[in-house]
Image: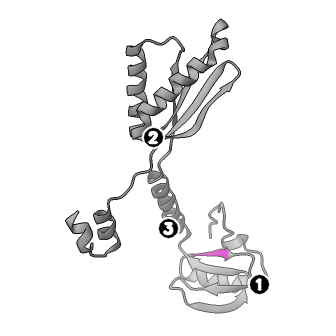
């Protein structure tokens, strides 16, 4: 008999407990028996004996096809990762003496990033004597946030850190319309929402 290397579970000959509680492949309990007898039952069925609850007294083992079990587990993990949405932080750099067209271009990029579900870090770097006029940078970042306010909220307001002033914007949470929400929950929308 061969032994499959287990990452999380002890299987087959790796189970060294004196007694184990055994569950059959269909979910029925076979009772408490020695690990040698349990392993023999698994071998007779051409399956694996897998310890699924090592902290129990006695430990619980199940007779199953471990390769199939691992495949289904990895498939579930892959589906969970696929459905996950990662939020990136995109940076938009401004300067205190930025021209109107350049400013509009930066705003357009920020709106595109926010529309895609990413957060935006807007920053202004002050050089030389510009550091004496940080209030101009704050006004510019406030204007930037105001233009983007339709689809974003200010996560962290403008703050001076060393020679940089930084502000973070996050996309607004998507609100589900009442009719769609009622249909999703399986309820009929009332007369007020139908007239709206």
Q: Position of residue 57 (x, y in %)?
A: 77, 84
Q: Is 49 within the magenta?
A: yes
Mark sitting earlier along the chain (2/1): 1
Q: Left of 107 or right of it: where is 124?
A: right
Q: Give the residue pinned by disc 2.
A: 152
Q: Secondary structure at mark 1?
A: loop
Which residue is depicted at the point 67% across and 18% down? 163
Q: Which residues are magenta?
A: 48-52
Mark 1 vs mark 3: give the one in front.
Answer: 1
Residue lying furthest left: 195
Mark 2 vs mark 3: give the one in front.
Answer: 2
Which residue is depicted at the point 40% across and 51% down? 174
Q: Main secondary structure of the magenta part?
A: strand
Q: Is 88 within the magenta?
A: no
Q: Position of residue 190 (x, y in %)?
A: 26, 74
Q: Secondary structure at mark 3?
A: helix
Which residue is at the front of the view, 125 or 68?
A: 125
Q: CA distance from mark 2 to mark 1?
A: 54 Å
In this rendering, the count of numbered labels is 3
Q: Position of residue 116 (x, y in %)?
A: 40, 39
* Quadrant of the snapshot with the C terminus: bottom left
Q: Residues within 10 Å of mark 2 (few under 14, many from 20)?
A: many
Q: Mark 2 touching mark 1, by CB under 8 A?
A: no
Q: Give the residue pinned by disc 3.
A: 68
Q: Left of 14 or right of it: where is 43?
A: left
Q: Residue 104 is drawn in which quadrant?
A: top left
Residue 57 has which mark?
1
Mark sitting earlier along the chain (1/3): 1
Q: CA distance from mark 2 to mark 3?
A: 46 Å
């Amino acid at each position: 008999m061969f032994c499959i290397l287990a990452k999380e579970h002890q299987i087959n000959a790796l189970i060294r407990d004196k007694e184990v509680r055994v569950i059959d492949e269909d979910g029925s309990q076979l009772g408490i028996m020695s690990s040698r007898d349990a392993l023999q039952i698994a071998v007779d069925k051409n399956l694996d004996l897998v310890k699924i609850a090592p902290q129990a007294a006695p430990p619980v083992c199940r007779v199953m096809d471990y390769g199939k079990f691992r495949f289904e587990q990895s498939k579930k993990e892959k589906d969970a990762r696929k459905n996950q949405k990662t939020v990136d932080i995109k940076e938009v750099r401004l300067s205190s003496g930025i021209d109107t067209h350049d400013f509009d271009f930066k705003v357009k990029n920020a709106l595109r990033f926010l529309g895609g579900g990413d957060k935006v870090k807007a920053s202004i770097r002050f050089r030389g004597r510009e550091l004496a006029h940080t209030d101009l940078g704050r006004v510019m970042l406030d204007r930037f946030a105001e233009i983007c306010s339709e689809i974003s909220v200010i996560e962290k307001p403008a703050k001076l850190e060393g020679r940089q002033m930084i502000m973070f914007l996050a996309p607004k949470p998507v609100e589900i319309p009442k009719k769609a929400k009622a249909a999703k929950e399986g309820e009929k929308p009332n007369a007020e929402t139908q007239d709206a």
